[in-house]
Amino acid sequence: MKAKTLALGLALALTALTPVQAQRGGGGNWELLAEERVTLGNDRDVIRLNHDEAFYRAKAYRKLRFVASGGEVRMKTVRLIYLNGYGETIDFSQTLRPGQNVDLDLRGERSFIRQIEMNYRSKLGISIGGGGIKVNQPTIRVFGENVRFGRPGGRR
């Protein structure tokens, strides 16, 4: 009897932690870099990280994760500008529905990001419920997976 109660309590505790884990981008060491509301139609948002070299001695991002919520978002391109000024454009061409995400691998020196430019298009989301008709504006959250687990300035 006690084992069943303990197992049930553990299962409930893990269920309660799931939304917190999802907020952080899933398992691993994901950090929220930015959250942008997507306007109706074509939109472009720029996330400026503006970290210096000292920051990247303690941190390095292995992946970026783009998570949609509140509506459907058609990711077109993502342009990454690195610490050294070099930039590259990545063609995404993916539609993210609410709750879906897509990862972008950052290999080698690609982890030293200064700026992320996102080009996308959103669809109008409408929900009908007890409060009447509601228009949902999509949101994109961008997470970085930190592989060094350190803090800025080299402290661990």
Image (tube, rainbow, N blue to C red):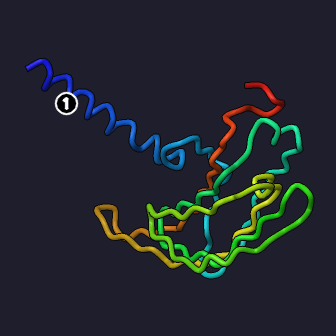
Q: Give the position of the N terminus as an image quadrant.
A: top left
Q: Position of residue 37 (x, y in %)?
A: 61, 63
Residue 108 in which image quadrant: bottom right
Instruction: Indicate left or right for 86 with 123 as reference.
Output: right
Q: Secondary structure at mark 1?
A: helix
Looking at this rendering, what residue extends furthest in the left direction? 1
Task: Locate residue 67, reporting x and y percent.
Answer: 54, 60
Tell me where residue 100 appears, x and y as whole percent. 46, 64
94 relative to 151 in the view: left or right: left
Looking at the image, which residue is at 33% across and 35% down? 14
Residue drawn at x 51%, y 62% is 101
Q: Quadrant of the C terminus?
A: top right
Left or right: where does residue 140 sit relative to residue 84?
left
Q: State the residue position of label 1.
A: 8
* Quarter holding residue 63: bottom right
Nearer-the-camera pick, 35 or 142:
142
Does 140 appear above or below 121? above
In the displayed structure, would residue 12 be above or below residue 108?
Answer: above
Residue type beneath disc 1: Leu
Q: Residue 64 occupies which quadrant of the picture?
A: bottom right
Q: Check the image and name the residue furthest to the top.
A: 2
Q: 2 or 75: which is nearer to us?
A: 2
**x, y (%) of residue 21?**
46, 42
Residue occupying the point 15% across, 24% down: 5
